Amino acid sequence: MVISSSNSYSKSNPDVVKISSVNKINLKRFPQNGQIQIYQSSYRGSYSSIIRDSLRNAALGRKVLLVQFMKGGVKQGIANAVKLCGNLTWVRSSHSFDHYHSEEIENNKDLKESIHESTYELWDFCKKELLSGENDQIILDEISLAIEMKIIDKDDLISTLENRFISGDVILTGTDIPKDLLLMANQITELRS
């Protein structure tokens, strides 16, 4: 059966159901969010395929935001984000724990506070980007470690993901993703060595 509102087409085709404009239903259009994808692995540094895909997407014209929460060393921060392919914004924390031994961080209150502040600043930036709808894809690399270290609140992340406005995908990576986040995911990929 074919549905048509064209009178000339329906007269010559008896299988056509005529719909008048009076009977049309006004449907409310809801903004459609993309999928939540989770990549988890038993070890850090196993997400090169995601970075490769983000470069490919940017080269194809999609606006991509790649945020590496627990990588540092390049004194990057939000103010010094790297732009690649014209469409990929790559941001790392301005101060990260991965250049220190865990004992150094625990024994140095100022260092620990600085790492937490720069990581939270990055999360605050990500929240705004997730709610803005300006990106086609957002990758939150090693966000589970930031949750585990109690820098980012898991419930804050969940709330932000529930209220996001992005038509593309949000990708979360980490070594131990909380179950609440796994339940939100449209796709879960476990990387094994």
Image (spheres, rainbow, N blue to C red):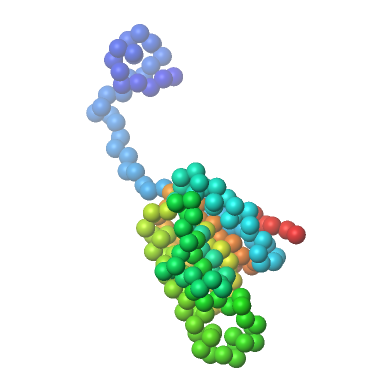
**Side of 152 where 102 appears, left or right:** right
Q: Quadrant of residue 9?
A: top left
* Residue 159 shows in this picture: no
Q: Residue at x 38, y 54 (%)?
A: 134
**Side of 11 where 122 appears, left or right:** right
Q: Residue at x 34, y 43 (%)?
A: 29
Q: 168 or 87: which is nearer to us?
A: 87
Instruction: Specify the quadrant that holds the N terminus.
Output: top left
Q: Residue at x 29, y 31 (%)?
A: 24
Where in the figure is residue 92, as x and y percent of width and height?
Answer: 51, 68
In this view, which residue lies farthest toward the top? 12
Q: Is residue 4 above or below residue 66?
A: above
In this view, which residue lies farthest toward the right? 193
Q: Quadrant of residue 99?
A: bottom right
Instruction: Specify the quadrant that holds the C terminus.
Output: bottom right
Where in the figure is residue 16, as x and y percent of width and height?
Answer: 38, 16
Q: Residue at x 42, y 59 (%)?
A: 130
Q: 180 or 69: which is nearer to us?
A: 69
* Residue 4 shows in this picture: yes
Where in the figure is residue 173, as x and y percent of width and height?
Answer: 59, 62
Total residue callouts: 0
Q: Is residue 169 above or below residue 17?
A: below
Q: Is residue 117 above or below residue 136?
A: below
Where in the figure is residue 159, as x and y percent of width and height?
Answer: 44, 65
In this view, which residue lies farthest toward the left? 22
